[in-house]
Image: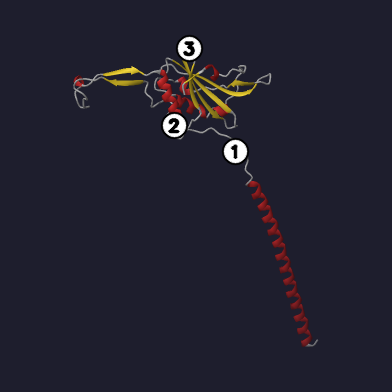
Amino acid sequence: MDTSILLIIAGGGVLVLVVLILVVFVLQRGGSGRRATTSQSEVTSKQGKAFILPPASPTMRPPPMPIHEDTSTLSSQVPTWSSGAGGFTPAGTPVASRQVIDVTPINVVQRLTQEVAKLRSNGYEAVSLAGRPDVEEYCVQIRVARSDGENVSIHLICTDDYPIIAPQLIATMLGFDACGELAEHHLALDSSVLRSWNGNSSLLAVVNNLLGLISYAQVTNQPPTQQSVWAQYTERII
């Protein structure tokens, strides 16, 4: 066979091979572009769903500066300095020549007023204090919201022996009774601060202790009452 014919056949084969390679390359570029477009749309769709946030649930506000649950900065006694002829005595003076200190127990209403101020300064805003007209008994009510959005009322009931005697804890939550009427349901709550109460303990320590327990507290078997605990204390103080 003539050499020129062989060269023509070889050249035609190379040309066909180049054309096939170009066709395959073009097809691959088109397919990857379609896959990239599809992948991008899926990512966009997923991201779009991720930014649809559920409505925020009301939560309890923890105090910004919690204190140790078994201690209090409030004093159960008020020191009264007697007025001597020598005036103020320096700390380095011998004991025999120092002024005499008269320690007087603090009034229960004054102490509870300080406790309420301490609660409010630590982030608990819905705090009230009231007394009963028939007995010397006082109630400090603290209203907080559970993580599920339900409002809880913490009642700390103090007698005239407070803070020597620990307050009584009653926690309630509004709901409907068997007759469909709005009533107070009692919650099963216990505080380790109340169990180990002493004269230096505080209501702030009790509420701080209860803060992590309220969301899990269950309703007791006690029948709900239509008269609220707070309604019994008609003498509003704060």
Q: Which mark is residue 45?
A: none
N-terminal of the two: label 2 or label 1? Answer: 1
**What residue is drawn where x is 59% and y is 29%?**
150
Residue that carries the numbered disc 3 in the rendered image: 135
Say how the picture is coloured. Answer: secondary structure
How many callouts does the rendering have? 3
Q: In this image, 155 relative to 17: left or right?
A: left
Q: In this image, 127 relative to 38: left or right?
A: left
CA separation in Å, label 3 and label 2: 29 Å
Residue that carries the numbered disc 2 in the rendered image: 121
Residue 233 coordinates in the image, percent (x, y): 51, 17
Residue 20 coordinates in the image, percent (x, y): 75, 72
Residue 199 in view in this figure: yes
Mark 1: amino acid: Ala
Label 2 vs label 1, nearer the camera: 2
Q: What element carries label 2?
A: helix
Quadrant in the picture for residue 56: top right
Residue 207 coordinates in the image, percent (x, y): 48, 26
Q: In this image, 165 relative to 170: left or right?
A: left
**What residue is drawn where x is 62% and y is 20%?**
183
N-terminal of the two: label 1 or label 3? Answer: 1
Instruction: Please identify the quadrant where the N terminus is shown.
Output: bottom right
Residue that carries the numbered disc 1 in the rendered image: 56
Q: Which residue is farthest top?
A: 134
Q: Do the residues labelled 2 and 1 touch (CB within 8 Å)?
A: no
Residue 163 in view in this figure: no
N-terminal of the two: label 3 or label 2? Answer: 2
Mark 3: amino acid: Val
